[in-house]
């Protein structure tokens, strides 16, 4: 069992989630149960799955939860693209947030690779 709070990938994904909550506060009210909810759910799923994986026994289970987090990050990438194309996000905000998601995905991939190499 690991302490997820000590992982840089968890910290970065937690901060990403906070950013997503802030940015979606200005989305149209009609999107509260649509895109706003989807972005928040997908972003929160990333650090939540990292935390859950850290609570499991063994690297294989942790790697499985990191893969789930990776799927949520990919889903978030699409939702951000959709939000930009719908005009809910300006290009500069989209680029900054998209870069953050890419960084988290890169960190997740590296961590998964490390766990598989050790196992």
Image: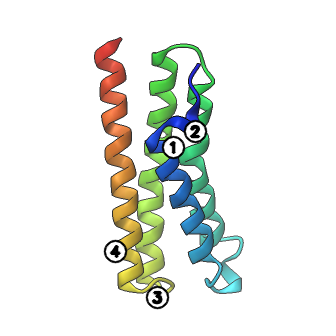
Q: What percent of the width, then of the height, locates residue 8?
A: 44, 43
SS under mark 1: helix
Whole-number angstrom distance, CA of label 2 to CA of label 4: 27 Å
Name the residue at 45% across, 52% down. Answer: 73
Q: What percent of the width, then of the height, locates residue 113?
A: 30, 28
SS under mark 2: helix
Mark 3, Cα crowd under 10 Å, few <14 / some 14-19 / many 20+, is few
Mark 2, Cα crowd under 10 Å, few <14 / some 14-19 / many 20+, is some
* Disc 2 + disc 1, Cβ < 8 Å: yes
Dot 4 or dot 1, earlier in sequence: 1
Dot 3 or dot 2, earlier in sequence: 2
Q: Is residue 115 left or right of residue 59?
A: left
Residue to which mark 4 is pinned = 95
Q: What percent of the width, then of the height, locates residue 68?
A: 50, 38
Say the numbered circle drawn on residue 10: 1
Q: In which quarter of the image is the N terminus?
A: top right
Residue to which mark 2 is pinned = 5
């Amino acid at each position: 069992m690991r302490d997820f709070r000590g992982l840089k990938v968890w910290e970065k994904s937690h901060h990403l989630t906070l950013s997503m909550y802030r940015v979606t506060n200005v989305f149209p009210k009609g999107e509260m149960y649509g895109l706003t909810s989807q972005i928040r759910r997908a972003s929160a799923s990333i650090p939540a799955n990292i935390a859950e994986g850290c609570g499991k026994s063994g690297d294989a289970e942790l790697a499985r939860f990191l893969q789930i987090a990776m799927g949520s990050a990919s889903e978030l990438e699409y939702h951000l693209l959709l939000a930009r194309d719908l005009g809910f996000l300006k290009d500069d905000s989209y680029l900054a947030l998209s870069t953050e998601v890419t960084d988290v995905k890169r960190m997740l991939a590296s961590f998964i690779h490390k766990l598989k190499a050790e196992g």
